[in-house]
Every structure is written in structure tokens, then in C-alpha cells.
Amino acid sequence: MVALGSELGRLAEVATARTQAEVALVWDWQNWWAVEGCAHPVNTFDYVDTVARHHRALWNGHVAVDVVTLDDDLSPYRVLVIPNQYMMSPAQTEAVRRFVAEGGHLLASFFSGIVNEDDEVVENGYPGALREVIGVHVREFSPLLDSVTVRAADGQTLLDGGFTATCTLWQDDMAVETARPLAVYDEGYLAGQPAIVDHELGQGHAVYLGTRLDDDALETLVKQVLDRAGVRSVHAAPRGVEVAERRTATHRFLFLLNHRQDKAAVVLDRSGVDLITGRRLVPGEELVLDAADVAVVQSPLIPSP
């Protein structure tokens, strides 16, 4: 307890520091109730798991994320991630359309934009609330009993040509209108048809997932969306090390938390002082974190000449 009290004293300035996230992840309580309701093509939706999987892909990319609803102000963000947003009000639909048209980057997953806030199907064909935004018409929902594979579509440039994924639970039968396929089903009755699409709307882009990707493929897609939006990781770190940064008017604080069961080394891109140990650090220096260890590196916001 004495050691903890000493550490907290050295971290006092962090209390006024803030994180400015460029990525927003949607969590919606009403949608949770609605998407897991009965009488859907699949009655095994797990909304909590779906949101967690999307968050995990962002977390592994070492980017700051705000959890929001579609009723919040979306203008501070470059990227908006919407997992299975089955229920969308007209105001939320307009907010998403405006976000993309004004230069935002959207990643939305299947069975989104289907009903309004009263659980009434939005007219104009599936997904009625998002059809203009994603540039496709979903002709039919097609739940999966087994897995299928998808591969990168010819001619697109967002995904590597060797991209493949194993998909489960769901597949949309999509008719492309103004979007372009990013990936297509490689087997099954929808072989050759789009599984992931990319749509340019105004100054922004909307990527729509018509199926559930495996974790590695989802992480790859998220990284490509972030890269195109110009969102960079806070700091390079090994997998399993959490990275965050907070700032005040004069300093920045780099948090490194090792969630692994073994040691992890982070090569620093900045000079500073580890507030936990008092150790002075320089760029290129290797900071080794024990299992469950943490470092808080304080640096001047504007480096001295």
C-alpha cells in the first residue's frame, strides 16, 4: 500500500490528462434487445460478443476508441464502427449518412439498418436505413449452418490480393448498386457474389460486411479501414500489450500495460520519464515489461529544440 501511494503521487498530473479518440464504436442498449429478439433469420445473435469482437480488432491495432451511440455527436471521429445495428431511427440514419458524406469512414456489419426505433421494417428494400450509404440491396438473408470461405475480389485495392477469410453464422445475398466488391464468396450457392463491399459516398467511404469474418480477417479489414482513414496506432507494441495516450496542454502520457503471461519489450519512439520507476528513457530504447506490468511515460508535448 505504501508503494501504491507513492506511485499515485507521481501520477497526479495524469488526472487532468485526456484522450482524443479518432475512432468510435457503437453500442446501443435498445438495439441489443431488438437484435437478439425472436423471429429473426438467426436466433443465436450475441450482440455483446459481436461488439467485443470489433473492439478487440481495434484494441489489437493500438488505437484509441470511444464507445458511442448513433445519437451522439459523430463529428470528432474519422472512423465509425457499427456492429449489427439492426434498429436505427431516421435521425440515426441521417447521422450516419452525413458522417460518411462529410468525409468519415464507416465499417458496418450485416443485419444493420433493418427496422426503425419501433421495430418496424424500414421500407425501400433491405437494408432500408443504410441502402444509400452502403450502395447495395440485400436481396436475401442466408444464415449459415457451416462455414464458407471468401477471397479478395478482383480489381479492388483496399485488401491484399491474397486476402481470405473463414465465415460463419450469416451471409447476405447482395445486389451491388453503386458499391464495389472488396471480397466475394469462394464457395457455396453464392460463390462469386460479393461478401464485403466498399462504397464511396460524398467525401467518405462505407465498408459493409455481409458475413461474419473470423477474428484474424476482421482484424485485417479493420486495419485497412483505419489506414485509409489516416488513423495511426498510438505506439507500436507487441500483441497483448495495451497502449493508450493521454495529453494535457504541456505533456503527453504513454500508458503501456502488459496483459500477457510473459515479458514483453516495447521499443520507444520518444524520450521521457517512466513515472512508475523514475527511469529516464530515450528514443529507440527497449522498455521491458514483466507480465501484468505497467509503464507510464511522460514526455513534453512539444519536444525541446
Image: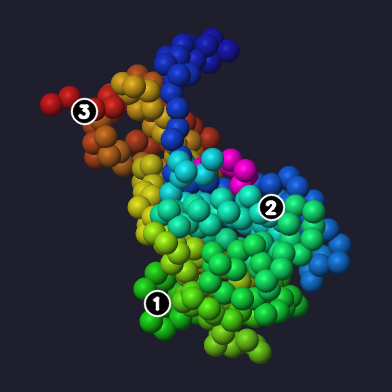
Is residue 101 visible in the rendered image? The answer is yes
Label 2, label 1: how far apart the Cα atoms are: 32 Å
- Residue 208 lies, with reference to residue 96, above or below; the image says below
Q: Quadrant of the N terminus?
A: top right
- The residue that label 1 is drawn on is 156
- The residue that label 3 is drawn on is 303
Q: Tell me the kind of residue under disc 3.
A: Pro
Segment tinted magenta in the rendering: 65-72
Q: Quadrant of the C terminus?
A: top left
Identify the mark nearer the N-term, 3 or 2: 2
Asked which quadrant contains residue 287, the reply is top left
- What number is the disc on residue 292? none
Report whether 124 appears left or right of 162.
right
Q: Residue at x 60, y 68 (%)?
A: 131
Identify the mark nearer the N-term, 3 or 1: 1
In magenta segment, residue 290: no
Are the residues tagged 2 and 1 within 8 Å (C-beta)?
A: no
Residue 109 in the image, given as x and y percentages of width and height: 61, 63
Residue 66 in the image, given as x and y percentages of width and height: 54, 40
Is residue 47 visible in the rendered image? The answer is no
Front tag of 2 and 1: 2
Residue 168 in the image, given as x and y percentages of width and height: 67, 72
- Front-most of residues 70 and 66: 70
- Residue 219 lies, with reference to residue 63, above or below; the image says below
Q: Residue at x 31, y 42 (%)?
A: 267
- The residue that label 2 is drawn on is 89
Report whether 232 appears left or right of 215.
left
